[in-house]
Amino acid sequence: MTNGTYWLEHAWLGTRVEPGVVVDTADGRITAVRAGVGTPPPGAQVLRGLTLPGLADAHSHAFHRALRGSVQVGSGTFWTWREVMYSVADRLTPDSYHALARAVYAEMALAGITAVGEFHYVHHTPGGTPYADPNAMGEALIDAAAEAGIRITLLDTCYLSSGFGAAPDAHQRRFSDGSAQAWAERTALLAAREHARVGAAIHSVRAVPADQLATVAEWAAERRAPLHVHLSEQTAENDACRQAHGCTPTRLLADHGVLGPRTTGVHNTHLTDEDIALLGGSGTGTCMCPTTERDLADGIGPAPALQRAGSPLSLGSDSHAVIDLLEEARAMELDERLRSRTRGHWTAAALLRAATADGHAALGWDEAGTLAPQALADFTTIALDSVRTAGPPPALGAETAVFAATAADVRHTVVGGRHVVRDGHHTLVPDVPQALARAVAALRA
């Protein structure tokens, strides 16, 4: 981390775009923000374009990046896609996962992402035997994030069953600790560090037996850690839950103490009105992953109703068919327009909040996601003169960012006051495309 002063040609300050904003940083945090400064102060680093708080990718499976381009065509369902995904998971080792995740997290930095929530469940060797270090795979991800220059919340995931009490199948054995108590004991060995925090995840109600849900929830509550869960992504899961327990997955989670302000349901796609009321009334968050949900033909979740009910929205790139949080934000609005045949469900500012402050809060980084004194000095700058963004006046920068820009327009990414991406180039991983190509080729070999 470094101390320094940045002059932002334009900056989004949560409700408006201001020209000529000076941001002072020290020890990785913002110490002062001054607007209306027409020329850069002597010695200031100049960031031309529109600077936003760093983006938060609240739901990631880093190894899914190896599937890009190979699973987007052809027929099938989520469940047939899952078999291909398992074949990649079978080949991961701590070294190969580190190499892939380092490249994926570097790609995220190039896209303006400064923090990632890694929903991590590939814990053990194929067959289920623990590594000598039982957290070797999780440590590989934490190290990868450090080397790529971004923050990580490792959402260590409890995954015990192939479905409502059934034993894990051959692919899933390396995901399972055998019981929630064993999961809790292993996960307790993980330590937070400056760039990394440790949270918990319940893979899904089909993967964690009902009588063990509370163990995971209590582990997170004791540590005041974020708790995430895949929720009602597929109607088949809802049907199986009703058959096994006589209720929806949301009701099952509520009955076992899982819901609450530190909990985030991922996808929340196929919900009843009662489910929406339970999630909103408890303050449980919703992480939408529109590019994955459309890629897997999951459906469009009731995000407006969830937000009205009191569920804060965040965004994730999930399977990494695309790594572009601006596209995720845009897709939230555009998908809802298709579903409802009406426009204007969110303002650009609201969508940016989901991609920044609310995303960081969902990952336990409440002090990030805003350009304000005492906040972490994490921000990203988007060009306003590319073929996509040229034309609109700078005052409409928020609208331009959400409805025109893409990850390709990111010019700078600063994390903890340090330039991780400068002029579109990663400063720590010199050739990100080559790093991705090598890592993916190694897994496919």
Image (cartoon, grey):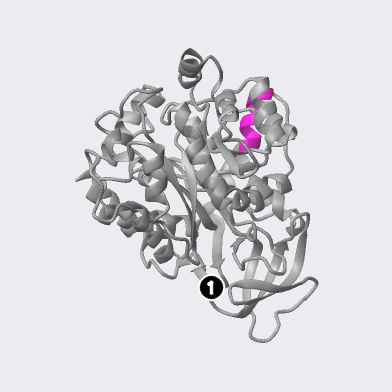
Give the image location of residue 286, x and y in percent.
61, 37
Q: Residue furthest right?
A: 36
Q: Give the residue drawn at x 35%, y 27%.
A: 162
Residue range (magenta): 332-340
**Magenta stretch: dominant secondary structure:** helix
Q: Give the residue drawn at x 68%, y 35%.
A: 282
Left-right relation of 273 to 113 = right
Quadrant location of residue 271?
Answer: top right
Q: Secondary structure at mark 1?
A: strand
Quadrant location of residue 288?
Answer: top right
Residue 326 appearing in the image: yes
Whether residue 334 is in magenta: the answer is yes
Residue 225 appearing in the image: no
Give the image location of residue 439, x and y in percent.
28, 53
Q: Give the residue drawn at x 45%, y 32%.
A: 212
- Circle 1 sits on which residue? 418
* Residue 184 vertical position relative to residue 18 in the rendered view, above or below: above
* Residue 307 vertical position relative to residue 275 in the rendered view, above or below: below
* 10 Å crowding of disc 1: few (<14), some (14-19), many (20+): many
Foreground of the two, 142 or 63: 142
